[in-house]
């Protein structure tokens, strides 16, 4: 199992100690570093800034939201980043959720799978640079059929460094996970846990089959972000995870349309998820956080004394996960490296 560094979302500014953490990951030979975006910092700018200071790690976006950019703009960024990094860029894409897409970007959210399929189609055409880019889709049409009526199919002026630049898809539902295996080169899970391994393995197998076995478990990368919190007291460590779980289960998405809720419910926590969501939406965030049992945290995170975490890491290595994405400072990067590599 490979290791990667997830720099995550920004709060009021860049994550503290991120430059040193990236330098440590690069020095130790980690697989990759990844950035994220929601409705604050963007994913590309910090990746280019920090990536310029690295030599070894691959540089991935986890994720670039498809509603934030037209597919040709995402492909242009990928072409540019791949050249600047000498072939180290990985394009992670995701549909986000209706609250962000419609509230922040002002775009309609329905049919995210169909939109994603068309989006990736256009990106791959740009990256291949074999012909002018065209698509007569339900969500994207190139050239635009209306307007001035002067649009024409175009090829990028930049020649790709790699035509097969890796594309990853962030996905949580079974159909979207299967789509990642069908049309992409990697999957970015969220709130994955070893107990859900068989469920996702079946979804990935369906995707490989639908894609004509273009990918397989031997070639497909599954880069999984995980909260890893070492502390002598396991409950104290879990308290660092509980607020984020409460936010995602309770408030990150509307009632009845929350993909994160569904992920935790599939792990056997549906009743608890309803309690968390009810309390959170009633404005009782502290009570929603307190309603999360330790076992629920341990299903999706590595928390507690170092010896406990070291014993649990092999459970993750035995799943479909191929790359574990850890967030933390340089000290944690070095600590995790020792735990995994001995």
Image (cartoon, rainbow, N blue to C red):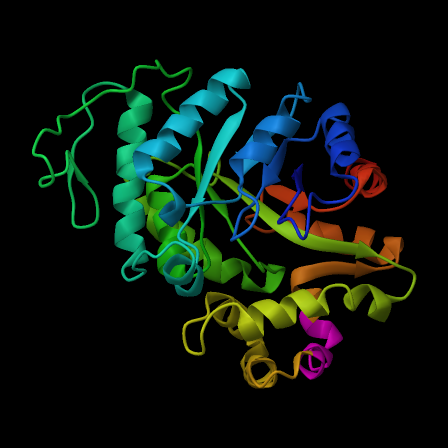
For this rendering, which residue is in front, 159 or 69?
Answer: 69
Is residue 322 rendered to the left or right of residue 177? right
Residue 292: within the magenta? yes
Specify the quadrant of the image occupied by residue 300.
bottom right
Give the residue displayed 19% in from the left and 20% down from the top. 131
Quadrant for the N terminus in the image: top right
Among the 4 quarters of the image, the one containing residue 80: top left
Q: Looking at the picture, does residue 292 appear above or below residue 17?
A: below
Taking the image as shown, residue 144 lies to the left or right of residue 283, namely left
Residue at 47% x, 54% y: name it: 201
**Extent of the magenta region:** 286-296
The image quadrant of residue 74 is top left
Coordinates of residue 276 in the picture (x, y in percent):
60, 81
Q: Which is the main secondary structure of the residues drawn in magenta? A: helix
Q: At which x and y percent is residue 114?
A: 26, 52
Residue 202 visible in image: yes
Residue at the location (30% across, 54% down)? 113
Is 199 a magenta residue?
A: no
């Amino acid at each position: 199992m490979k290791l990667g560094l997830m720099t995550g979302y920004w709060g009021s500014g860049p994550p503290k100690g991120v430059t040193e953490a990236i330098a440590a990951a690069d020095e130790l030979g980690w697989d990759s570093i990844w950035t994220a975006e929601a409705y604050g910092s963007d994913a590309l700018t910090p990746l280019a800034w920090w990536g310029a200071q690295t030599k070894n790690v691959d540089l991935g976006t986890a994720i670039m939201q498809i509603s934030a950019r037209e597919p040709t703009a995402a492909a242009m960024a990928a072409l540019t980043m791949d050249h600047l990094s000498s072939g180290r860029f990985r394009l992670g894409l995701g549909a986000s959720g209706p609250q962000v897409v419609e509230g922040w970007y002002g775009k309609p959210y329905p049919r995210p799978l169909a939109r994603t399929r068309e989006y990736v189609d256009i990106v791959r055409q740009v990256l291949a640079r074999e012909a002018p880019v065209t698509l007569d889709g339900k969500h994207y049409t190139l050239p635009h059929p209306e307007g001035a009526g002067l649009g024409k199919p175009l090829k990028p002026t930049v020649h790709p460094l790699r035509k097969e630049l890796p594309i990853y898809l962030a996905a949580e539902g079974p159909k979207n996970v299967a789509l990642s295996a069908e049309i992409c080169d990697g999957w970015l899970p969220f709130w994955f846990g070893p107990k859900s391994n068989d469920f996702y393995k079946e979804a990935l197998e369906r995707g490989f089959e639908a894609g004509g076995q273009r990918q397989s478990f031997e070639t497909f990368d599954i880069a999984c972000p995980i909260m890893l919190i070492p502390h002598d007291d396991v409950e104290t460590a879990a308290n660092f995870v509980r607020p984020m779980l409460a936010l995602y289960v309770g408030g990150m998405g509307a009632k009845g349309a929350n993909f994160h809720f569904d992920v935790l419910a599939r792990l056997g926590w549906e009743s608890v998820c309803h309690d968390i969501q009810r309390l959170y939406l009633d404005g009782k965030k502290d009570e929603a956080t307190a309603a999360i049992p330790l076992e629920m945290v341990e299903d999706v995170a590595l928390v507690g004394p170092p010896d406990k975490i070291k014993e649990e890491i092999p459970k993750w290595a035995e799943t479909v996960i191929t790359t574990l994405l850890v967030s933390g400072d340089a000290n944690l990067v070095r600590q995790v490296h020792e735990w995994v590599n001995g």
